[in-house]
Amino acid sequence: MARDKAKDDLMFNCNQEYEHAQVASHYGGNKEAVLRFLKDSCAKGDIFRFTHAQVYQLIKEKLHLPIPF
């Protein structure tokens, strides 16, 4: 599934489970690790007021996974 780049500038909403699932769905076999990372990052406030693009960049930096196309 291709990433919706139109959402890159929109804010990631930690309170919406579908946003967690949507982002994690782009990482195939690493989906569960990304879901855990998102939940933990939201709980700690690490991705508060982050755009989707910033969330993808953080996943790249912290989990060493490429940004999906």
Image (spheres, helix red, strand yellow):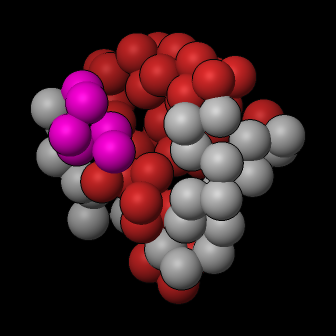
Q: Is residue 60 magenta?
A: yes
Q: Name the main secondary structure of what is drawn in magenta.
A: helix
User: Which residue sits at x=84%, y=40%?
Assistant: 15
Q: Is 32 placed left or right of 20 in the picture? A: left
- Residue 35 falls in image quadrant: top right
Left or right, residue 4 beside residue 21: left
Q: Nearer the viewer, residue 27 or 10?
A: 10
Which residue of the protein is positioned furthest toward the right in this rendering? 15
Residue 51 higher or lower than 23, as above or below = below
Rendering quarter of residue 67: bottom left
Count of all numbered marks drawn on residues in the image: 0
Residue 57: x and y in percent read 30, 54
Q: Is residue 31 magenta?
A: no
Residue occupying image coordinates x 56% and y 59%: 50
Query: Is residue 4 shown to the viewer in this render?
Result: no
Q: Is residue 28 left or right of residue 54?
A: left
Give the position of the C terminus as an image quadrant: bottom left
Res. 61 visible in picture: yes
The one nearer the camera, 14 or 44, is 44
Q: Residue at x 75, y 52 (%)?
A: 13
Give the image location of residue 56, x and y in percent.
37, 52
Please name whichever residue, 4 or 51, is drawn nearer the observer in this view of the structure: 51
Q: Compared with residue 52, is residue 5 higher up or lower down, i.e. above or below? A: below
For the N terminus, give its image quadrant: bottom left
Query: Above or below — where is 61 with respect to 57?
Result: above
Most extreme residue toward the bottom is 6
Q: Which residues are magenta?
A: 58-63
Does residue 58 appear to the left or right of 65 in the view shown? Answer: right
> Where residue 31 appears, x then y in whole percent?
42, 24
